[in-house]
Structure formats: structure tokens, C-alpha cells
Image (tube, helix red, strand yellow):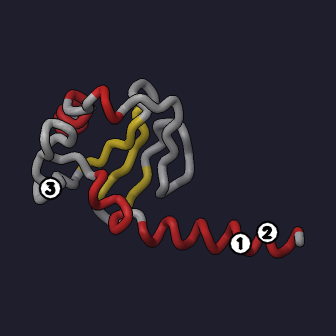
């Protein structure tokens, strides 16, 4: 496991990691299969912690917030980070829904 990945997992706050399900919005998998985003960022699910782990992206521009978000927590930028993947998924789901109705 890469050092940056270990640091990210160590930085997980119990308050925001209470989910039992985590889906990688890049490859839509729930296992640890990595996916490449924007040619340099790797997004992986941590099956043990049920969170997304981004490598090759420090997210250091997002400061900690009142003990709720840690340095490097990407919650505040997820809509931008995954916007293309989400748009593609929405288009596929809408197309499939139209086929059925």
C-alpha cells in the first residue's frame, strides 16, 4: 500500500465514515478495483473503511474544518472531481429508463 494511501486511511474521521456501502464513481464498483481519473488521479474504494481513497491528488487546497474534515479530505470537491463520471452515468441511466417506458 502506498504511503499516501496509508495516510489517507489514517486520516478518516469516524464521524464521516459510518457507511456500510461505498461506490467508486469512476468505475461504479464497490470493491478495491482502482480507476484512473483525469489521467493522473487514482480512485479506489477501501473495502475495510467504506470510503474512497484518492492517490496522486493531495487535496491540500482544502483546509481542515472544525475537527470535522481533515487535511486532504475531498468531500468539498467531489462534485467537481467526479462531474464527468456522474454526467455519463446519468445519461446511461436515463437512456435505459427511456427504453423501458
The residue positioned farthest toward the right in the image shown: 101
Q: Are marks 1 and 2 in contact (CB under 8 Å)?
A: yes
- At x 85%, y 73%, the residue is 99
Mark 2: few/some/many CA within 10 Å (<14, 14-19, 20+): few
Could you say which quadrant of the image residue 3 lies in? top left
Q: Secondary structure at mark 2?
A: helix
Residue at mark 1 to residue at mark 3: CA–CA distance:
33 Å
Given residues 35 and 12, the one toward you in this image is: 12
Q: Position of residue 72 (x, y in %)?
A: 17, 47
Given residues 72 and 32, the one toward you in this image is: 72
Give me the disc on residue 94: 1
> Label 3: which residue?
62
Q: Are marks 3 and 2 in contact (CB under 8 Å)?
A: no
* Relative horizontal placement of residue 11, taking residue 33 as reference (left or right): left
> Label 2: which residue?
97
Could you say which quadrant of the image residue 1 lies in? top left
- At x 74%, y 74%, the residue is 95
Q: Position of residue 86 (x, y in %)?
A: 51, 66
Q: Position of residue 75 (x, y in %)?
A: 30, 51
Residue at mark 1 to residue at mark 2: CA–CA distance:
5 Å
Residue at mark 3 to residue at mark 2: CA–CA distance:
37 Å
- At x 53%, y 72%, the residue is 87
* Relative horizontal placement of residue 50, taking residue 6 as reference (left or right): right
Given residues 37 and 91, the one toward you in this image is: 91
Amino acid at each position: 500500500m502506498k504511503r499516501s494511501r496509508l495516510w489517507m486511511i489514517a486520516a478518516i474521521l469516524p464521524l464521516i465514515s459510518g457507511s456500510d456501502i461505498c461506490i467508486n464513481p469512476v468505475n461504479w464498483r464497490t470493491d478495491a478495483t482502482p480507476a484512473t481519473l483525469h489521467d493522473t488521479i487514482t480512485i479506489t474504494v477501501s473495502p475495510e473503511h467504506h470510503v474512497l481513497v484518492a492517490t496522486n491528488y493531495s487535496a491540500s487546497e482544502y483546509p481542515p474544518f472544525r475537527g470535522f474534515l481533515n487535511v486532504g479530505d475531498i468531500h468539498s470537491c467531489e462534485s467537481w472531481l467526479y462531474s464527468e463520471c456522474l454526467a455519463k452515468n446519468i445519461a446511461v441511466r436515463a437512456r435505459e429508463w427511456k427504453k423501458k417506458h
